[in-house]
Image (cartoon, grey):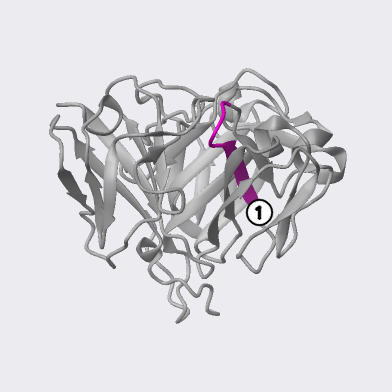
Amino acid sequence: MAAYTTIDDPSAYFKVQLYTGDGNDSRTITFDDTDTDMQPDMVWIKERSSTSSHYLTDSVRGIGKKLEPDGAGAESTEGLSAVTSDGFTIGTSTNQVNQDTITHVAWCWKESADAGFDIVTYTGTGSAKTESHSLSAVPHFFVIKSRSDSGDWNVGHQAFTYSSNDYIMLSSTAALDQQSYVFNGTAPTSSVFSVGTGNDVNGSSRTYVAYLWTEKQGFSKFGSYTGNGNADGTFVYTGFKPAWILIKRTSTAGNDWGIFDNKRLGYNVDNEELRPSANDAEQTDDRLDILSNGFKIRLAGAGFNANGDTFIYMAFAEAPFVNSKGVPNNAR
């Protein structure tokens, strides 16, 4: 069997960490896997057993500078104080990151062109323009958020038709929409992405952050699927065993985004859902199986499997289906 990936250990670039809050300041969370240490550049935390907004910080804006994926608010500073060589430190305990007795999950990425992830900050001009990125490849998924002002999280995806002005909002249950003021009707390239004149992406003198990903074989995948309305749902091939999956129904409004990962609870069919477009606690309905080479929808519900509707997804690997030596990994 031919070699499949250049990333044999996905945990060098992406990790899922579970922990229970203790309400204390100055607490260090160390990743509890036994694979490669990773100093994260983006940390996204969500309470599991209680309601609180999502918390997202990164090393480019500055660790501890918070944005909330389920909200429109501007950047503020609280929560984390640092990242470590294999984890992160909670400086000021808040309900979002360390509420006593509440279970939490942290999703953590390392910024690296090798793993297809780049963080870009820029200042808006109010006139359509391009911004450079460092992926050296076309971004397949990217999201832009205003830092200095309130505004929605605007998402581009390789399944979209940029010439038709397609975009969708991470912080909303809305369907795919078309507005020229978001991405200026222009697809991203291997060196730049385009923004229109909208305040959410390019208001004059406002500051922004963009998170951009490109596919890396055996490590990440950004695609779409069509629902079949059946409990024996659609199978989506990714080429790896997913550690993390994000899904959104795009052809019809009214459904939240859903996040699944390999730690909550981490076995089929009990893979619990969190919603980046809402502050809800963890949802326990059985929605999908995580498999050695992709995922399979396991319910007929509209949010993930409406018959004939389109869904986009992004996924990151726990393990490649076939490693760089051509050796297949075990099924889950």
Observer-nearest of 189 and 36: 189
Q: Secondary structure at mark 1?
A: loop
Q: Is residue 162 above or below residue 316?
A: above
Whether residue 144 appears in this view of the structure is yes
User: At 87% from the left edge and 44% from the top edge, which residue is drawn?
Assistant: 163
Quadrant position of residue 263: top left
Rendering coords of residue 190 (x, y %): 71, 65
Q: Residue furthest right?
A: 163
Residue 24, located in which quarter of the rendered image? Answer: top left
Residue type at the position of mark 1: His
In the rendered image, residue 332 lying in the magenta stretch gets the answer: no
Residue bearing mark 1: 140
Q: Is residue 146 magenta?
A: yes
Which of these two is toward me, 42 or 244? 42
Residue appearing at x 49%, y 26% in the figure: 70
- Residue 222: x and y, percent? 61, 51
Q: What are the residue bounds of the magenta stretch?
A: 140-150
Please name the residue shown 60% across and 22% down the image.
Answer: 173
Lateral position of residue 194 relative to residue 173, left or right: right
Q: How many marks?
A: 1
Q: Position of residue 58 (x, y in %)?
A: 42, 48
50 vs 285, nearest the viewer: 50
Q: Residue at x 61, y 59 (%)?
A: 214
Q: Is residue 277 above or below residue 212?
A: above
Relative side of 319 to 136, left or right: left
Residue 227 visible somewhere in the drawing:
no
The location of residue 74, given as percent across then percent down, is: 50, 29
Within 10 Å of disc 1 (Cα), the crowding (few <14, some 14-19, many 20+) is: many
